[in-house]
Amino acid sequence: MADRSLSIANPNPLFTGFWEKVALGIFAVVLLYILVLISGTDPLGPLSSFWAISIALTGATLLFTWQKYRKTTPGIKNDGVWFSGMMARGAIGWILGIFLTGFYVLLYWFPGSLGMGQGADGANIGLIAVFDPFSYWIKGQPASEWFMYGFFYSVAILLMGIKFLVKYRHSTYHQIRTWSVIFFQLAFAFTIPEILLSLNMPYNNFFNMWPLNYYFFFDWNINQMMEAGTLGIFMLGWGIALVLIISPLLTYFYGKRWYCSWVCGCGGLAETAGDPFRHLSDKSLKAWKIERWMVHLVLVFAVVMTALVFYSFFSGKASIWIFDSYQIRAWYGFLIGAAFSGVVGVGFYPIMGSRVWCRFGCPAAAILGIQQRYFSRFRITANGSQCISCGNCSTYCEMGIDVKWYAQRGQDVIRAACVGCGICASVCPRGVLRLENGPEIDQRASEQRVITVQGLKMDA
Amino acid sequence: MGKRTKGKRIAIIGNGISGVTAARFIRKQSNHEIYIISKETDHFFSRTAIMYIYMGHMKYEHTKPYEDFFWEKNRINLIRGEVSRLDFEQKTIHFNKDFGVETSYPAPEKLSYDLLILATGSKTKYYNWPGQDLKGVNGLVSYQDLEYMEDQTKDIERGVVVGGGLIGVEMAEMMASRKIPVTFLVREPQFFGNTIPEEEAKMVSKHILDHGIDLRLNTEIAEIKGDKKGHCEAVITTGGERIPCQFAGITTGVTPNVDFLRDSGLEINRGILVDEYLRTNIEGVYAAGDCAELKKPPPGRKPIEPIWYTGRIMGMTVAASICAGPTKYKPGIWFNSAKFFDIEYQVYGHVPPTIPDELDSFYWQDQKTPRCFRLVFTKGEEQVTGMHGFGVRLRQEVCEKWIADGKTADDVMAGLGAAIFEAEFTKAIEIDMIKAYNRARDKNLKLRQKRGWRSALNLLTGKS
């Protein structure tokens, strides 16, 4: 269609007002300042830098949100999404993607370059040192790279969650589930584990479920919990019950959404900070095929690795046949735990969408998906023959499900991947989709969902 | 049905919802050789989604209901070209050699067929206003219209939309999404007032105003003035007002796209005349969708209904006729949908703009948000004949069953839970609705069902 400008920044950013540009400018300055901190110098000193970054990020997000939505009526806000350099893989999107990817590479493999333990006597400098005062205040210890990461992660979910809440202010469903992910991130993923550390208890996020939490059954983790008294035993018991009882029950009644878009931290980030990129997921049949192979292979990898952990734990032997239990753990941690879930999972948001990890890599999502597909009451129902095949549902599905393929046939959507975010139903301009917890899957009454042609019995 | 017959060659002119639906269902039931011919695009795309491309919600690729491999996989041959002449005697389609559009599916010189389906759709209807041929004056039905609008609305100071129908409000929303000031001329006293009752029309009109549209009710276009370069400069209303604008969207309705078929021997009135089996006057030639005009429309229906849903049902009907023997076009209970900025609209059965004497109606409107619901029923027996919701999602199967079974107004109101298709946790508007109903009609009804699929299923399977 129309010629696109070749300039790096869109010369005519129709959808970005003055104060939105100011907000984005502040955000860019914060990113640059973080680069300065990474270089090892801190012009303001840790405490001032901490407050400066926190206030700037909060201010920029709130200013952006207020400015973007204040003059709008409640409703769907997707105007100009595919014209945006940030949201449609333009130059700004790529720059952000490279920044995030680079940040994750440093975080996982070169924390020293972020200032971790690089000062005199192993003290922190640079970016990590910025979080020392806050860390001392919470738990009386210096910050680690994971404390810094947890802080940024939680702030991203909180602030972008607020933006999401305003964007979808017309939908109670989105309000409730967004408060839910904010709560689980702030309370269970960030604060409680840090408090546990300050009490000399094992670090534990009660809702980071095996096998997403792949080290839950590692010997050091189990030993740590066993040695931590009643609370430690409770952690172990809760972790096992979560996998074997609580999750299967909740997934049976409500689908995997109870976890993936209400509780999980990865999902929490995807639903909030990742929302502007949700439409970048690949909807092709080919992508679905790759997804099924990849996610289930990761699941097999996780299960085999955990089985070897148990084998070593009980037999005391490090290897069986050609498998070295410890080496496999190390490889899993490197390939899946760090490279896939972190670097690719979040770093590639602006390029491949917000759910790359959840869709192609998360072994917990794979288990929940199998359950959702075969033993759950959750489905998305299609409203008769009202679908006009417009494609909004598929476009905005972060999991890359071609929702309209089902909707235009008047068929329920029952897909392992679906995280039940409900955006497809929201963006549908004709009220065709509804998330439902109905009777059993096989009681779907498909004979009643035939497209209206009276006297004609034709399967859609 | 389902038996696979041996191959005839079926040519379908038009790759919209009617032609494509016919092709798909013919493929499901037969081994016929299928050709779909389009002048507009290589592949089928959802014409109803044109607005979302302009607004940046989607790109063109996203509006294709099927991936590009679908056609070859299902042995549906595609041809992109312009039909220059139809030879019904020789059963041959001749193509324009100088079509000159780059395509993956170039047209042959000619194509012979055994059966022909005409599904050529609609085009914008103009009423011979002076200046209607100026640059920057256009409707919105095809991909080319979208390209034209994209091109003509760059950096303009104001756009005018003429005609208060469904495409009109879409065009207003499209330009507003690009921060282009819009003046919207509507002939009726309220937007959509010739289709829906006054209260609803007022609510929607107010919503349009809330979106910053300069909505002019009771206003008609007289002419369009052009500048020296032959480009639209202003729209003049019948009241004599001059509205400067660089683009005028014409949305005063559509008319069957059949000009190239006139004088071909086909019986054509406004559209291609068809009988109840969607057969034209020429043996082996069918017409479906917007371009077809029913000689004897079913009771309560119009001869031409240019909407997506009837197009799809017609496509299925033609496919059934071809594969399983003559099948009558029975569109069932009327339904339609639209969206007016943020307000979704769904209708089942008939809700006339003025409630006639033999009918009665109950109307509910939310106090705070733009949402309303109307139930129409007969006087005396109080049998439900139609209902619609604005900002209220309703389950089609349930509403249809109520109308088909002739349920009473009381029955429907008490059973509303089964019809509500709103997202989980949304406000229980059905409680408000039944309270209003009780007040208005001095009754004491209570809601019988909870919301949700289980309720709907029980109702549909007759368990409750």
Image: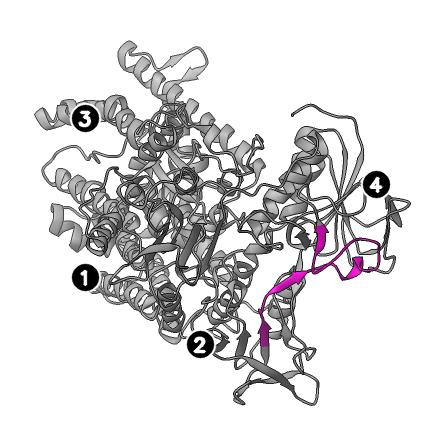
Q: Earlier in the sequence, mark 3 or mark 1?
A: 1
Q: Is residue B260 magenta?
A: yes
Q: Nearer the viewer, mark 4 or mark 1?
A: 4
Q: Is residue A208 left or right of residue A81?
A: left
Is there CB contact under 8 Å for labels 4 and 1? no
Asked whether residue B69 appears in the rendered view, the answer is no
Label 4 to label 2: alpha-carbon separation: 50 Å
Q: Give the vertical position of A189 relative to A444 (above or below).
A: below
Sequence-first tag of 4 and 2: 4
Instruction: State the residue position of label 1.
Output: A47
Q: Position of residue B310 (x, y in %)?
A: 58, 48
Left or right position of B392 against B48? left
Check disc 4 and report the residue beneath it: B113
Q: x, y percentage for residue B247?
A: 59, 77
Q: Which residue is mark 3?
A: A238
Which image quarter: residue B134?
Answer: bottom right
Question: Which residue position is annotated with label 2?
Answer: B215
Type of amino acid under label 1: Leu
